[in-house]
Amino acid sequence: PELPAFQPSLLTLSSSKMAPQKSTASQPVRLYTKGTILGYKRGLRNTYHHTSLLKLEGVNDKAASNFYLGKKVAFIYKAQKAVAGSKFRVVWGKVMRAHGSNGVVRAKFSTNLSPTTIGSSVRVMLYPSNV
């Protein structure tokens, strides 16, 4: 009698019976929350360009916005000319206080933000920590 041909697929376990593999490489941790520039602090007739209004992702009430008071804010944009090997520039700011009751905050930047930045995204860093 002739033996059947060797089939290596019969020796391997199906993937459902194998133990799950743990990856040794961890995912990078994001140390900021995304936000959007809504515009400037303003009244009916006057605008105050030194204070910008930001809507933060996942913040929908005044109590939740209190966590972000004092946090650093980075507006990152890309310029034509590379400085120090990078075309990206940053304007730093700080969350000053809440604005209203829907989770919008007021922030002041080192230089006033241009009106063209309205609608752009910012990074609200999770430092300095108050916890």
Image: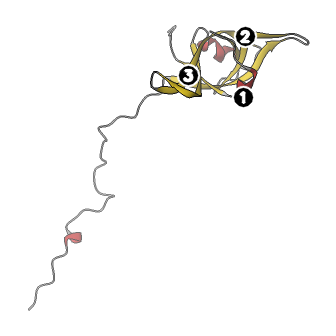
Q: List the residue tagged with mark 1.
A: 119
The answer to which of 119 and 28 lies nearer the viewer is 119
Mark 2 or mark 3, earlier in chain: 2
**In the image, is 17 to the left or to the right of 118?**
left
Q: Residue flagged by tag 2: what amino acid is it?
A: Thr
Question: Which residue is situated farthest in the bottom direction here?
Answer: 1
Q: Amino acid at mark 1?
A: Gly
Is 5 placed above or below 46 here? below
Quadrant housing residue 11: bottom left
Foreground tag (2 vs 3): 3
**Labels 1, 3: front one:** 3
Q: CA distance from mark 1 to mark 3?
A: 18 Å
How dense is the environment of label 2, judged by Cα within 10 Å: few (below 14), some, or many (20 and up)?
Answer: many
In percent of width and height, residue 80 lies at 58, 29
Amino acid marked by disc 3: Arg
Q: Residue at the spot x=76%, y=20% of the render?
A: 39
Give the left or right position of residue 7, taking residue 81 as reference: left
Q: Which residue is mark 2?
A: 51
The residue lying furthest to the right in this view is: 45
Q: Label 1 vs label 2: CA separation?
A: 15 Å
Residue 54: image location, x then y, percent: 69, 20
Foreground: 61 or 97? Answer: 97
Residue that numbered label 3 is attached to: 89
Residue sitting at 29 percent across and 46 percent down? 21
- Tell me the quadrant of the picture where the N terminus can be found: bottom left
SS under mark 1: loop
- State the image coordinates of residue 119 (x, y, percent, origin top left): 72, 28
Residue at 32% in and 37% down: 25
C-alpha separation, residue under disc 2 versus residue under disc 3:
20 Å
